[in-house]
Image: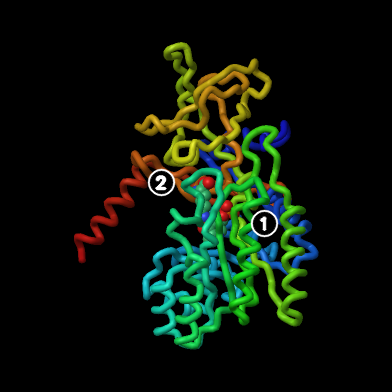
Amino acid sequence: MLPQDRQQGELLAIARAYGTPTYVYDGRVVKRQVQALKAALRDVPSFLLYALKANSSPAVVKLLRDLSLGADVVSPGELALARRLDFSPERIVFSANNMTDEEMLHAVREGVLLNIGELTRLEKFGRQCPGAGVSLRINPEFGAGHHEYVVTAGQRSKFGIPVADLEKARAVAAEHGLRVVGLHQHIGSGNLQVQPYVDAIRVLFEKAEDFPEATVLNMGGGIGVSYRPQEPSFDLDQLARVLRENLNGFAERFPGRKVQIWLEPGRFLTAECGVLLVEANTLKKSFGQTFVGTNSGMSQLIRPAIYGAYHGVVNVSNPNGAADRYNIVGNICESSDFFAHDREVSEIREGDILAICDAGAYGMAMASEYNLRPLPSEVFIDLDGRPHLERVRETPDELVDRMLTGRRKLDSN
Ligand code: LLP
């Protein structure tokens, strides 16, 4: 979704005040997305957990906590952030991949529910925590996503216990007196069609029949947003209908058994709230194309490079210039370093400020210091429309200082 005229003015003012590159997150958009999801699910007994991996900027996470979401965390770092931001343990689910014994026991001590997606880990959990409650991450044997790298179920996927192995999981749980209180799945990310969920949710309900203590049916995240103009959006009402139908059918077959649907959206809540503000600093004609070089790049927004992902681009400092076609590229030494190819944008001049749109999810969260480029600043616009500087870009010298300080610590030990 591209920013409207008034928002373009706000973004330009932020770029002028705090410089670039800067990520800007609009809390009002996050709230709008939460409300849309809650409205669609109003008749579905459900609980929303925010997948922190999409955007772990504390101001964004705190807002989602205040909007009563739980936290889906996948590492000790995300768990620490959720706890430090006062999510209570019963609102947190820990789904680390390849978790170690230490990580597992730490999560248990923190009192959060664990999603376990491997029989071997379930066995270790059973031995070390007999009698505990646990949730199983299942692999329904098919997945779906906006790119093959974000499909997280199916035969080629490392995630989840294949449904064919759930009997074995039941036996392991029984051997150690584990209570399987939940079933979880996450089929993939960036889905704009409901159909893959229709099938996956059916599997979740079918398998719940074999786990009588399971009260949580977690369908994971993956709801997409439309990055491209005119791309149809995900039909939340259809998803809600599918959930209701399954819940009703289940209640008829198992009267008295209470189950609740959990969802773990990341992208849906945060993608559209964010833009990356960059400065066009180098215009170049080459073989009949115009390259616009910027002061940011794939190290700060890697989605185009990895997935060929589309992000809208708006020239917020010259919104009414004559449109032209540009290759908008970054300052990193790789040819995959681009924001947009052959894209129509209003005339770009050196010094213009560009907003790379829909960058609130998996933008800063996946950024690195590749080429020793310091990470961008972050600005959060609160629910009253006031911008707050949340994170300040380091200078290259500060970044290098941090590297050398780490080295000195090692030397002094
Ligand atoms: N739950 C689990 C277990 C997950 O692995 C994920 C995302 C989510 C929830 C949230 O999914 P979402 O609602 O955000 O689609 N870097 C990729 C996306 C990777 C998603 C990984 N797992 C991208 O930029 O498109």
Rounded to the nearest angstrom, the CA distance separating label 2 from label 1 is 37 Å
Q: Nearer the viewer, residue 375 or 1?
A: 1
Disc 2, SS: loop
Q: Left of 40 or right of it: where is 369?
A: left
Q: Is residue 148 left or right of residue 60?
A: left
Image coordinates for residue 65, horizontal then vertical, percent: 64, 64
Name the image colouring: rainbow
Residue that numbered label 2 is attached to: 368
How busy is the neighbourhood of tag 1: few (under 14 within 10 Å), some, or many (20 plus)? some
In the figure, 260 relative to 35: above or below?
A: below
Whether residues under marks 2 and 1 lie with C-beta atoms below 8 angstroms apart, the answer is no
The answer to whether residue 352 of the structure is visible from this angle is yes
Q: Is residue 81 visible?
A: no
Quadrant holding the C terminus: bottom left
Where residue 82 appears, as percent x and y from the top left, is 54, 66
**Quarter holding ligand 1:** bottom right
| Kind of residue indicated by mark 2 | Ser
Residue at disc 1, secondary structure: helix
State the image quarter where residue 355 is shown.
top right
Q: Nearer the viewer, mark 2 or mark 1?
A: 1
Nearer-the-camera pick, 353 or 244: 244
Q: Nearer the viewer, residue 262 or 94?
A: 262
Residue 150, horizontal then vertical, whole percent: 50, 49
Query: Looking at mark 1, is its residue's CB closer than 8 Å to ligand 1?
Result: no
Q: Position of residue 15 (x, y in %)?
A: 57, 35
Q: Residue at x 61, y 61 (%)?
A: 264
Q: Disc 1 residue type? A: Val
Q: Which mark is residue 198?
A: 1
Q: Count how many numbered circles sit on residues in the image.
A: 2
Q: Decide: few, some or many residues near mark 2? Use Cα within 10 Å; few <14, some 14-19, many ≥20.
A: some
* Ligand 1 lies under 8 Å from the Cβ of mark 2: no
Residue at 50% across, 72% down: 166
